């Protein structure tokens, strides 16, 4: 793993967020809460240009969650899927909200039924200059290459096989069973929503799931940093899960080690406060 | 071999893909796979198989009926896998998850097949095996054991029978087991579940519980809390007695931090979920208190509170506050040190005009000089006095004088408080306030234009006193306080009816800090706190009108009253008690003030106190009357419990009779007042009579009661219902003799009712 050049970078706790290329035109309204168009991360740091080692057969399955399933969770989704992890992603908001011409006029779409492609087309027709400048179109471009459209966490039928055409995309391989081992949320209220929702569902499946929050600000630079951090976390979790599976070594249980791994990760990424619990599907 | 293994795994994987696509094939695939992944298979296969089984039996698409059959079929394999000595943790983990999923299914099967002993025995030995691992296994297995135990408890305590006619839809629980079941008699299962629950909740009491176990337990309790009434109280109590921060002793390792925070947040998530589900439940208050307490503690421990003071990390532009603030901070102190501030407390004129700091000079008595000498000195001095310095000095004295005569002078000095706060909060940055003060000071005439900022060495900085509050500010802040008190009151729960009954006459109002206490505090604040103080502000009105000019309270107490009124009207059915308590206070306060006014000597200028009771009583009444329906007891209760009823009230009651549907309400209310409120009896009878005369709809019901209370009216009255205009010409038509009798009962006494308004008679009749 140490040979992986991306990991060497990810370990650096300094914020090396500045992409090699110049950042896009000045992002408008920094303070805005909504996702501000994660700038397409494909060219940056070429996270997928070299395939991961294939001999690790066991992979933890991940799920990334943010408010609108557009910026932060999708950046992380892309990162994890390029690292060959099975990964799903969801939003916990009531609707998909993307920034509009002003803070009071967001573009609103419904979850589960709107594709990234249709959002892209609509916004491109509305005002291509604005939406390209604020990073929304590049973000949607990235998203449509990852999966069909934003999905809502609360509507997710956990354990339902994901084989339909709409559910295919990057990272869907290995997650066909419709279940994951680790949920990573990108904001504390999303963590709250996920944990509460799991309690609400009544844990009918008896399957444990680690729910981890990594607090990422909702703008595209932070989403890039957050995506790297999440990949770093995923790698260290997966490594531990694989160690547990080494035959004959039964003492270091993966689930037990999660707090310790997270603490270690937190030292590497002090600017992204983390939170964890073990829940049930 | 390795290649063969890989092939096998690939085949198994493709079989899995098939059932994921077509869940109807699960039964065949499961039974087909079992021999391949059994206890004799290689570890990789066992792992795959165990994982597959746990996925299969948790799958929501596997039809329940077939799932149950398959569950019975896999018991043997599960048992064998568990009994392999030193079995791999990953396999055991998956098997325990599978066991949790099938426990209910097998249970359901046994309910229907009470004589299939071997099956239940297999399940029982799996259960024993899993329970043995609960305390000793690796953590990953232990959490699955916790979930398994939760499932046993869920199954073996009675649930709710949703629909007895459709047993197949019932949730699997003890409630579906026949009392006389040979193998799983409820009398044996329920104690077992109870024992397991105790053991499960034990995790909250141990000193060094692992966070992963605590979280796993907390996160699976939701279902039990929701659907198992009989044990939910026990569970909530256990959680409320749990201290997730007990391991938070400094210094914490980063890992311990993650764990402690996790336990606290998970506890909070579960409790908040319960709280939202039932905000009026018996535990709601305790849950809220618990959550608040631990949120505070967590913030203290992890110092999260300080995070909000951190400056934003985004780049700041030139307009940013932080920069502006820094510029201001470099200004020299405005107040020159050689003009002393007035000492606090009452000041003499001498102090007011003394600008020098020289004590000797200040104490010099000018009157000791002969006037001629004074003139000789003063004239030349005045002639060459620096104009600017003079203006400056005059302004200074003027400012002092203005501050002295300002009515708010006696308010507490906020500045003194500010100093204290600085001590408590080391990072409290008062620059904002200073900026505001300086801005205010800029508006004043320049005081220090002579004072050059020459002394570059800054003396100790003294926070200037804030300017005194103006009347408007006071009022605004007062209103803020009122709103706060109301919020506080609203946030408190209603005391349960049971508790409220207890103290009886020994009750001390406002003694325990519940909602009722706040109601008492608020009503007394409104009626007593500033009684008599407000009146002066209205003196120029000159009018001694009982009803004050409208509009939201011009004084603090009126603002409270206004809020109280709104509060009551918002939900008057629930809050009528508050209205009554308040109006009683108002009435009492009015009386006390009247007494005080009368006791003072006649010549004294003490103004007649303003009366509030009637105005507010009528407003409350006006607020509720439009919403009353025909059967409402509320009006009767209100009128019977307020201390005084007058004609204006009855006018409103009479108004009800205009609505044919509420005629009965009006009559009943009057009748109640007649019977139960002797002081109001006469006016109530008058009102009834008036109704009888003027409202056709009221004729019959009113007549019935009038017959008892004032029969003479009925006798003496013409029947105006059909043709009132005929009698219109008669003077005093109220007392005109009746051309016909209206009711049979009163007809006999008709003759001797010439003195119509004889008040004493009906009262006597009532006794």
Image (cartoon, coloured by chain):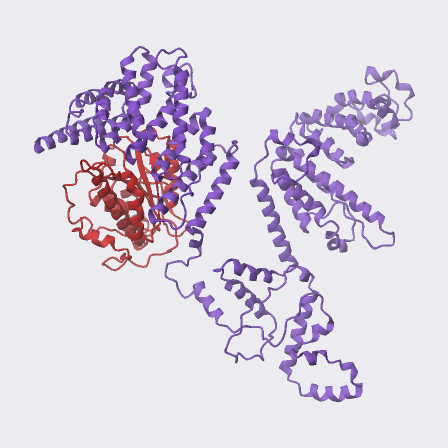
Chain colours: A red, B purple
Q: Residue at x 36, y 15 (%)?
A: B184
Q: Is residue B435 above or below residue A111?
A: below
**In the picture provided, is A260 more to the left or to the right than B437?**
left
**In the picture provided, is A184 more to the left or to the right than B422?**
left
Q: Is residue B422 above or below residue B169?
A: below
**Residue B203, image quadrant:** top left
The answer to whether residue B22 is seen in the rendering is: no
**In the picture provided, is B747 more to the left or to the right than A280?**
right
Task: Residue A219: give x, y in percent of width and height.
Answer: 33, 52
The answer to whether residue B450 is seen in the rendering is: yes
Q: Residue at x 67, y 33 (%)?
A: B625
Task: Residue B716: give x, y in percent of width and height.
Answer: 87, 23
Q: Is residue A216 above or below residue B459?
A: above
Q: Residue at x 73, y 86 (%)?
A: B378
Between B299 and B124, the one nearer to me in the picture:
B124
Task: Residue B154: give x, y in percent of width and height.
Answer: 38, 24
Q: Is residue B385 above or below residue B101?
A: below
Task: Residue B701: give x, y in percent of width and height.
Answer: 75, 21
Between B659 and B240, the one nearer to me in the picture:
B240
**Residue B83, image quadrant:** top left
Q: Quadrant of the C terminus of chain A?
A: top left
Q: How many marks?
A: 0
């Amino acid at each position: 793993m140490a040979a992986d050049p991306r990991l060497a970078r990810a370990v650096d706790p300094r914020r090396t967020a500045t992409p090699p290329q110049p950042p896009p035109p000045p992002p408008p309204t920094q303070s805005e809460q909504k996702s501000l168009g994660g700038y397409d991360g494909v060219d940056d740091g070429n996270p997928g240009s070299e395939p991961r080692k294939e001999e690790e057969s066991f992979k933890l399955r991940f799920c990334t969650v943010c408010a609108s399933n557009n910026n932060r969770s999708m950046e992380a989704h892309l990162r994890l899927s390029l690292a060959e992890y099975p990964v799903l992603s969801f939003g916990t908001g009531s609707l998909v909200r993307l920034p509009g011409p002003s803070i009071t006029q967001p573009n609103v779409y419904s979850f589960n039924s709107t594709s990234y492609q249709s959002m892209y087309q609509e916004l491109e027709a509305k005002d291509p200059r604005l939406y390209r400048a604020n990073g929304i179109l590049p973000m949607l471009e990235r998203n449509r290459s990852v999966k069909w459209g934003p999905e809502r966490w609360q509507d997710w039928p956990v354990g339902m096989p994901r084989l339909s055409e709409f559910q295919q995309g990057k990272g869907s391989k290995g997650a066909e069973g419709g279940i994951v081992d680790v949920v990573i949320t990108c904001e504390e209220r999303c963590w709250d929503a996920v944990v509460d929702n799991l309690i609400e569902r009544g844990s009918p499946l008896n399957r444990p799931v680690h729910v981890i929050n990594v607090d990422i600000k909702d703008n595209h630079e932070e989403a890039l940093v957050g995506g790297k951090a999440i990949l770093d976390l995923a790698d260290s979790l997966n490594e531990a899960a694989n160690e547990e599976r080494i035959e004959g070594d039964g003492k270091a249980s993966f689930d037990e080690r999660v707090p310790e791994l997270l603490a270690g990760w937190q030292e590497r990424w002090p600017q992204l406060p983390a939170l964890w619990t073990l829940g049930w599907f | 071999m390795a290649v063969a293994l890989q092939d096998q795994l690939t085949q198994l994987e493709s079989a899995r893909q098939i059932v994921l696509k077509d869940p109807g094939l699960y039964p065949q695939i499961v039974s087909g796979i079992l021999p391949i992944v059994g206890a004799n298979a290689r570890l990789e296969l066992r792992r795959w198989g165990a994982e597959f089984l746990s996925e299969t039996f948790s799958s929501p698409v596997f039809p329940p009926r077939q799932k149950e059959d398959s569950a019975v079929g896999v018991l043997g394999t599960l048992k064998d896998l568990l009994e392999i000595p030193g079995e791999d943790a990953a396999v055991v983990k998956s098997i325990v998850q599978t066991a949790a999923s099938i426990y209910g299914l097998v249970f359901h099967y046994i309910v229907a097949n009470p004589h299939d002993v071997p099956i239940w025995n297999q399940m029982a030995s799996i259960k024993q095996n899993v329970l043995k691992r609960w305390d000793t296994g690796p953590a990953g297995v232990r959490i699955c054991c916790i979930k398994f135990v939760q499932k046993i408890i869920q199954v073996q305590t009675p649930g709710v029978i949703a629909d007895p006619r459709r047993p197949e839809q019932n949730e699997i629980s003890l409630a579906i087991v026949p009392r006389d079941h040979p193998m799983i008699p409820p009398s044996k299962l329920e104690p077992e579940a109870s024992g397991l629950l105790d053991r499960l909740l034990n995790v909250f009491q141990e000193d060094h519980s692992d966070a992963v176990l605590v979280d796993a337990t907390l996160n699976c309790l939701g279902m039990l809390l929701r659907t198992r009434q009989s044990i939910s109280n026990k569970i909530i109590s256990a959680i409320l007695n749990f201290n997730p921060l007990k391991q938070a002793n400094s210094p914490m390792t980063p890992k311990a931090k993650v764990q402690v925070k996790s336990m606290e947040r998970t506890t909070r998530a579960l409790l908040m979920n319960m709280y939202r589900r039932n905000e009026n439940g018996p535990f709601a208050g305790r849950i809220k208190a618990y959550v608040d307490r631990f949120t505070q503690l967590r913030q203290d421990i992890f110092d999260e509170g300080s995070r909000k003071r951190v400056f934003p990390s985004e780049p700041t532009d030139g307009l940013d506050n932080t920069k502006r603030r820094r510029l201001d901070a470099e200004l020299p102190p405005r107040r020159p040190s050689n003009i002393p501030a007035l000492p606090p407390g009452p000041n003499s004129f001498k102090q007011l005009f003394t600008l020098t700091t020289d004590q000797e000079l200040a104490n010099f008595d000018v009157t000791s000089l002969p006037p001629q000498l004074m003139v000789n000195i003063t004239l030349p001095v005045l002639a060459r006095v620096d104009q600017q310095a003079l203006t400056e000095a005059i302004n200074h004295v003027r400012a002092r004088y203005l501050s002295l005569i300002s009515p708010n002078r006696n308010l507490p000095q906020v500045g003194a408080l500010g100093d204290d706060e600085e001590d408590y909060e080391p990072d409290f940055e008062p620059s904002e306030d200073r900026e505001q003060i300086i801005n205010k000071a800029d508006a004043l005439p320049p005081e220090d234009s002579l004072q050059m900022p020459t002394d570059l060495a800054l003396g100790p900085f003294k926070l200037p006193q804030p300017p005194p509050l103006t009347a408007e500010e006071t009022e605004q802040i007062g209103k803020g306080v009122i709103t706060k008190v109301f919020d506080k009151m609203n946030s408190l729960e209603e005391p349960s009816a049971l508790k409220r009954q207890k103290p009886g006459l020994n009750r001390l109002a406002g003694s325990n800090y519940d909602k009722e206490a706040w109601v008492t505090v608020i009503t007394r604040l409104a009626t007593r706190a500033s009684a008599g103080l407000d009146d002066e502000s209205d003196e120029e009105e000159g009018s001694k009108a009982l009803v004050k000019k409208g509009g939201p309270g011009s004084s603090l107490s009126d603002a409270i009253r206004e809020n109280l009124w709104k509060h009551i009207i918002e939900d008057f059915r629930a809050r009528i008690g508050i209205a009554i308590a308040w109006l009683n206070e108002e009435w009492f306060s009015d009386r006390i003030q009247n007494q005080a006014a009368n006791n003072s000597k006649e010549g004294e200028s003490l103004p007649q106190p303003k009366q509030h009771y009637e105005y507010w009583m009528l407003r409350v009444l006006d607020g509720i009357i439009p919403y009353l329906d025909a059967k409402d007891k509320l009006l009767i209760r209100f009128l019977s419990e307020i201390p005084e009823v007058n004609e204006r009230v009855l006018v409103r009651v009479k108004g009800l009779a205009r609505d044919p549907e509420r005629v009965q309400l009006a009559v009943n209310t009057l009748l109640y007042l007649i019977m139960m409120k002797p002081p109001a009896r006469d006016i109530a009878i008058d009102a009834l009579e008036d109704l009888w005369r003027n409202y056709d709809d009221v004729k019959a019901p009113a007549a019935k009661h009038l017959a008892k209370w004032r029969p003479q009216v009925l006798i003496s009255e013409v029947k105006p219902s059909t043709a009132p205009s005929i009698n219109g010409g008669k003077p005093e038509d109220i007392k005109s003799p009746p051309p016909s009798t209206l009711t049979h009962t009163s007809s006999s006494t008709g003759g001797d009712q010439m003195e119509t308004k004889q008040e004493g008679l009906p009262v006597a009749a009532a006794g």
